[in-house]
């Protein structure tokens, strides 16, 4: 076996196969707890437990095989490993059923075999989802950086070139919902670049299509609170080019921030209020011009436009 394969086999940690382990433990508990029910339905408890153990071990073996193939430079190796894994599992099922048929000596329990096939499907779904998530991360080779707070941007994407992978940075001060949405925004840039290269605009129709697809998938998972979900559905109609550009969405996300004492949004301050920004510069809030507020710097008398959701402190 090539040394690089040994390296990645060593990195096949418990955390990597944790979804399969959890599936095995959950199914074991379900099978054990339902022993009386299975007897009433004429289902052999031992066959179910044996099937659970068999499919767990086979799934681990196939998962390891696919995990190694995933790091091969030839993508066809991974595809062949997936097909080979399916063949191995089918043969394992056939051999197990045939062996059970001869060992049972006329006491072949069909309901238990059918129930075991359901267990097989459960392992198949968990295994495929896990390995494809890992393949996704390996395929795109994304270097993710958790950045310090930046006022002008929430995240940033740089495409891969020469010996550098795709790079994405996301501000580390964001709440969990804002962090996820910003990460999806930047991943949409990655997908757009992979598909179109430099042939399209950074926030053109192609990027909006990719971002919309990702958002739609996550909205179906129902992981966002109702107010954020509503704002995201509005975003789907026309995603903002800047990660800071959708003020309605930012306003909703702001409700989930851990707000330090004394921090306010510019739009929350009465006109004429003095406020200070990072760096110590003092401004006086003025009138609203379209979506921004015209504010004057006290020291210089110069005017600046502030976003309605810009965070400031009172003087």
Image (cartoon, rainbow, N blue to C red):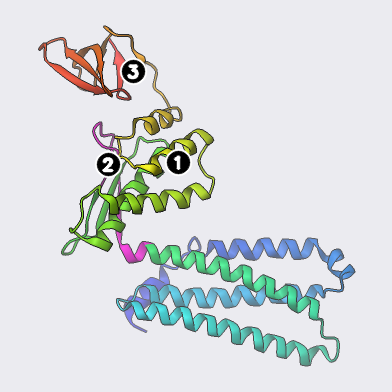
Instruction: State the image coordinates of residue 128 (x, y, percent, origin top left).
Output: 51, 69
Q: Nearer the viewer, residue 258 or 157?
A: 157
Question: Does 282 appear above or below 96?
Answer: above
How much space separates mark 1 and mark 2, taking CA atoms? 16 Å
Q: Nearer the viewer, residue 310 or 36?
A: 310
Magenta stretch encompasses residue 143: yes
Quarter of image, res 198: bottom left
Q: Residue at x 75, y 79 (%)?
A: 113
Q: Residue at x 17, y 20 (%)?
A: 304
Callout 3 crowding tier (Cα within 10 Å): few <14, some 14–19, many ≥20: some
Q: Residue at x 34, y 42 (%)?
A: 239
Quarter of the image with the N terminus in it: bottom left
Which numbered disc, 1 or 3, marks the residue that appears first in the sequence?
1
Q: Is residue 69 left or right of residue 26?
A: left
Which residue carries the number 1 mark? 233
Element class at badge 2: loop
Which dot, 1 or 3, sits closer to the camera? 1
Instruction: State the image coordinates of residue 160 (x, y, percent, origin top left).
Output: 21, 60
In the rendering, which numbered label is found on residue 241? 2
Q: Name the residue at the right extreme.
A: 40
Which numbered disc, 1 or 2, marks the residue that appears first in the sequence?
1
Callout 2 crowding tier (Cα within 10 Å): few <14, some 14–19, many ≥20: some
Instruction: State the image coordinates of residue 293 (x, y, percent, origin top left).
Output: 25, 18
User: Are the residues flagged by discs 1 and 2 in contact, CB closer than 8 Å?
Assistant: no
């Amino acid at each position: 076996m090539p040394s690089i394969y040994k390296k990645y086999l060593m990195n096949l940690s418990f955390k990597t196969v944790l979804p399969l382990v959890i599936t095995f433990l959950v199914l074991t508990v379900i099978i054990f707890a339902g022993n009386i029910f299975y007897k009433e339905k004429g289902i052999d408890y031992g066959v179910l437990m044996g099937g659970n153990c068999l499919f767990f071990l086979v799934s681990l073996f196939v998962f390891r095989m696919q995990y190694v193939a995933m790091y091969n430079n030839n993508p066809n190796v991974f595809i062949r490993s997936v097909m080979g894994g399916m063949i191995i599992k089918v043969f394992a099922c056939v051999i197990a059923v045939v062996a059970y048929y001869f060992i049972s000596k006329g006491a072949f329990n069909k309901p238990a075999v059918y129930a075991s096939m359901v267990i097989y499907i459960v392992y198949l779904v968990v295994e495929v989802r896990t390995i494809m998530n890992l393949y996704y991360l390996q395929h795109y080779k994304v270097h993710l950086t958790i950045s310090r707070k930046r006022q002008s941007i929430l995240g940033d994407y740089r495409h891969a070139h020469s010996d550098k992978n795709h790079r994405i940075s996301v501000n580390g001060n964001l709440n969990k919902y804002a962090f996820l949405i910003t990460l999806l925004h930047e991943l949409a840039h990655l997908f757009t670049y992979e598909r179109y290269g430099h042939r399209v605009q950074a926030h053109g129709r192609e990027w909006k299509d990719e971002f919309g697809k990702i958002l739609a998938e996550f909205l179906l998972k129902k992981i966002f609170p109702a107010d954020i979900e509503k704002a995201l559905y509005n975003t789907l109609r026309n995603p903002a080019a800047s990660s800071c550009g959708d003020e309605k969405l930012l306003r909703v996300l702001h409700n989930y921030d851990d707000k330090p004492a004394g921090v306010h949004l510019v739009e929350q301050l009465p006109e004429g209020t003095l406020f200070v920004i990072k760096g110590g510069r003092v401004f006086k809030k003025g009138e609203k011009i379209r979506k921004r507020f015209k504010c004057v710097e006290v020291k210089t008398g110069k005017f600046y436009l502030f976003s309605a959701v810009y965070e400031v402190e009172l003087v």
